[in-house]
Image (tube, coloured by chain):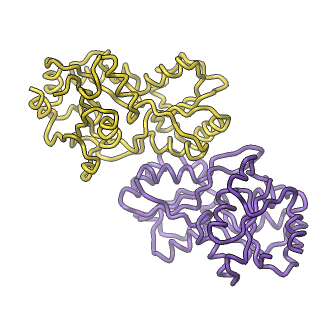
Chain colours: A purple, B yellow
Amino acid sequence: MPQAVLLDISGVLHEDGIPLPYAVEAVRRLQEASIALRFITNTSRKTGATVYAELLQMGFEVERSQIHTAPSVIKRYILQHGLRPYLLIHDDLVPEFDDLDCTAPNAVVVCDAEHRFDYAHLDDAFQVLNQGAPLLAVGTNRYFHQRGGLHLDAGPFVKALEYAADTQALVLGKPAAGFFHGVLEEVGIEANQAMMVGDDAEADVAAAMQAGLQGCLVQTGKYRDGDERWAPDCRLESSLMSLVAALD
Amino acid sequence: MPQAVLLDISGVLHEDGIPLPYAVEAVRRLQEASIALRFITNTSRKTGATVYAELLQMGFEVERSQIHTAPSVIKRYILQHGLRPYLLIHDDLVPEFDDLDCTAPNAVVVCDAEHRFDYAHLDDAFQVLNQGAPLLAVGTNRYFHQRGGLHLDAGPFVKALEYAADTQALVLGKPAAGFFHGVLEEVGIEANQAMMVGDDAEADVAAAMQAGLQGCLVQTGKYRDGDERWAPDCRLESSLMSLVAALD
C-alpha cells in the first residue's frame, strides 16, 4: 500500500483540457485518503501557475504546492549553479524564466519549445554547446497526445542536440530518478512506499520503477496497445476510480 | 596504390565556394593520372547540376558523370521501390525531386533541409513515420563547415525522427557502405583498390574504411584537432598536392 501517490497530469487527469471520466471524483477521494498526493508533469508549454489554474478550472481539488513541474526544477538548478541559459522554450513558458540572466549563455535549456524548434534556434543552441556548455533537458519524452494524435515532444530535439554536439543531456524532469526523489523528499516518504501513475509507459512508469517506486500505467492519453512491454507493476484498465478502490 | 580515388567536395576542394590552395591544380593532375576519379558528396542544399556548375565556375576540370550526390541515390531508390515521399529537403533541392509523386506519402526523405527543419514539418514527417513508412536519409553528418563555423547538418534531425518514431533510418549517402560501393561498381574497381579523401573523419574517412576502402583525412573544411581519433589510414597535412605526389 503506497503512502504517496504521484500522478501525471495530461493524459491521466484530463485530455485536451477535458477531465477524464471520474478523474475529478478520484482526485477528491485521494485527497481525503491518508496518503501524500502530488501532481508531477514534464509539461513545458505553460508555467506551473497556468497548470494550477487550469486544474482548478476543470474542477480538480488541488493545492499549488502539490504541483511539481519539470521546468521549475530546471530553474532551481540554474540558480543553484549560477548558469546563464540559452533558452529553447515555448513562448508561454517565458514568464517562468524571465528573471534569469541570459547574456553570454553558458548552458542550454531544452523544454518543449514547439515553434522555437526551428533550424536557426537549434543551430544557435548547437553553437553554445560546442563551447562546452551543459545541456539541461526537461525530459526525453518522444511525443505527447493532443487532439486525438501524437505530436513531437522535447525528447527528439534533445537527442538531436546530443548527437550534433556529441554530448549527453542532464535530464531534470521525468525519466530522471532525481525528479521523483526530489518530490518524495519533500513529502518525507521513501521511494519504495510510493507509486507513480502515468500514461507514458517509458518516461512515467518504467522510469519511476527504475527509481524504486511502484509504476502504474493508465490506458488513456498517449497510451498505445503494446505499451505493456514496459512491464508496469500495475495497470488501470478503466478509470482512476479503480486506483481509489485499490487504495481503500 | 589506389586505382580509384573518391574525393569529397566541400571542405576538400573548396570552402564557401573558394578553391582551397592547389586544389584546382591537384584535380587537373589527378584527371591526367591513370586512376578513376570520382567526386562524391552528401551535399543536399543544391542539385547535382548546381554542384557541377559551381565546380566548373571555380575552375575545376570535372565531368558531370564523375559527380555522385547522395540525393540522386535517394531518388533512384524511391523510383526503384515505387515510393511516394514526404520530402524534408532544402528549397534549392526541390528541382531534383519535382517529378516524383508525393501524394499520400508512404516514405519520409530527410536531406539537409535547413529552414524546413521546423516543428511543423518535423511533426508532419513524424505522422508519416508513425504509419510505418520508411525513413530515408541523405546521411548522418553531425555538422558542416561554412563561413568559419560549424552548423547543423541533416544527421541530428535524422536522429530526432528515429528516436521519436522508434525507427531506424535507411542511410543512402555517406557513411553507408552502399554509397561507396555503388560508385566503385560503376567504375569497375574493388573497394580494396580505392581511396576516399574527405574532411569528415567519421562520415567520409572512417565510413569508407569500414566499407573496405583506404581512408584519407584532409586538415581543411570541418576538420578539427582530435579527429585523428578516428584513425585514418593517412592524412594530408598540407594540400591535395601531397596526394598527387604520393600517387605519382
Q: Position of residue B81 (x, y in %)?
A: 56, 20
- Residue B232 left/right relative to B26: right
Quadrant in which residue B60 is drawn: top left
Quarter occupied by the C terminus of chain A: bottom right
Residue depicted at x 80% and y 65%: A55
**Closest to the observer, A101 or A192:** A192
Compared to residue B147, the image places residue B57 above or below, namely above
Indicate whether A145 appears above or below B139: below
Residue B29 horizontal/vertical position (percent): 13, 22
Image quadrant where one finds the N terminus of chain A: bottom right
- Residue A29 pos. (x, y %): 89, 73
Say if A56 sits above or below B224 in the image: below
- In percent of width and height, residue B14 lies at 24, 33
Q: Residue at x 69, y 62 (%)?
A: A205
The outermost residue toward the bottom is A188
User: Total marks drawn?
Assistant: 0
Residue under the point 85% across and 57% down: A20
Asked whether, in this view, residue B31 is left or right of residue A155, the answer is left
Q: Nearer the viewer, residue A151 or B242?
A: B242
| In the displayed structure image, the side of residue A226 where residue A110 appears, left or right | left
Residue B15 visible: no
Question: Is residue B24 in view from this perspective?
Answer: yes
